[in-house]
């Protein structure tokens, strides 16, 4: 496989899009010249603002809201839509919190009560909230989507999810079938699809 094809595979697997403009070709030329290795290019794509600002937040929002990874087409759609400015991660959290899938996991209704906050903390952070955190959210007047988004994009969840997101993206780069289930599952469950 050529360096360019490998690099385009990195873009599709990490950012769910083809490499922008001449960027992929430029990286391929630098690999051919010995100025960069493929591993360095892969890491550069992983560390790029596009990945950090759009891809990773969408994956974390899915895991926090639904306890599962997004389907390939869904993550590609939301990442592209958010990157274009037509949508925001906050609006995505609102949409997810209003869904029947979210209501099934965390109960229907709009109340940010102890039951909701406790359930969300356990599912997202793997722990119960501290007393002050619980009291804050209950008395904050915030909506469910705001609690969801705060936890999904928190430093704590970002750190907890990082190795699992990395494994998810590695499987995507490798061309593995789309996956279902939680990022935190010991193994993903293959589902049919391209």
Image (tube, rainbow, N blue to C red):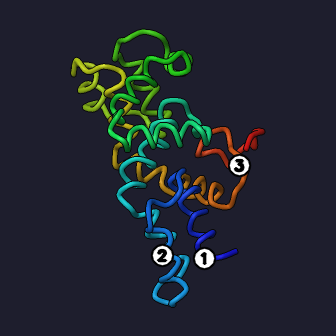
User: Which quadrant holds the C terminus?
Assistant: top right
Please tell me whether mark 2 sits on a helix, a strand or a loop: helix
Residue where numbered disc 2 is placed: 27
Which of labels 3 and 2 is toward the front?
Answer: 2
Dot placed on the residue nearer the N-terminal end, 3 or 2: 2
Distance Cα–Cα, label 1 vs label 2:
8 Å
Which mark identifies residue 87? none
Distance between the alpha carbons at the discs numbered 3 and 2: 33 Å
Residue at the spot 47% in from the left edge and 83% down from the top edge = 30
> Badge 2, how many Cα within 10 Å: few under 14, some, many 20+?
many
Depicted 187 relative to depicted 25: above or below: above
User: Does the CB distance between marks 1 and 2 fall below 8 Å?
Assistant: yes
Q: Residue drawn at (53%, 52%), measured in percent from left and top?
A: 17
Residue beneath label 3, please?
187
The image position of residue 192, as x and y in percent, is: 78, 39
| Callout 3 secondary element | loop
Labelled disc at residue 3: 1
Q: Do tag 3 and tag 2 residues touch (Cβ < 8 Å)?
A: no
């Amino acid at each position: 496989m050529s360096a360019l094809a490998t690099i385009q595979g990195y873009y599709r697997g990490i950012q769910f899009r083809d490499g922008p403009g001449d960027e992929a070709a430029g990286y391929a030329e630098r690999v051919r010249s010995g100025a960069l290795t493929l591993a360095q290019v892969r890491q550069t794509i992983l560390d790029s603002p596009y990945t950090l600002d759009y891809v990773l937040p969408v994956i974390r929002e899915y895991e926090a809201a639904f306890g599962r990874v997004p389907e390939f087409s869904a993550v590609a759609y939301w990442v592209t839509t958010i990157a274009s400015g037509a949508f925001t991660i906050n609006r995505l959290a609102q949409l997810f919190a209003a869904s029947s899938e979210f209501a099934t996991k965390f109960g229907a209704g709009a109340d940010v009560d102890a039951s909701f906050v406790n359930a969300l903390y356990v599912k997202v952070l793997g722990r119960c909230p501290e007393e002050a955190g619980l009291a804050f959210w209950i008395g904050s007047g915030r909506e469910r989507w705001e609690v969801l988004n705060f936890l999904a994009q928190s430093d704590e969840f970002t750190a907890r999810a990082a190795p699992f997101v990395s494994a998810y993206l590695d499987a995507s780069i490798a061309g593995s079938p789309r996956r279902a289930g939680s990022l935190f599952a010991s193994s993903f469950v293959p589902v049919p699809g391209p």
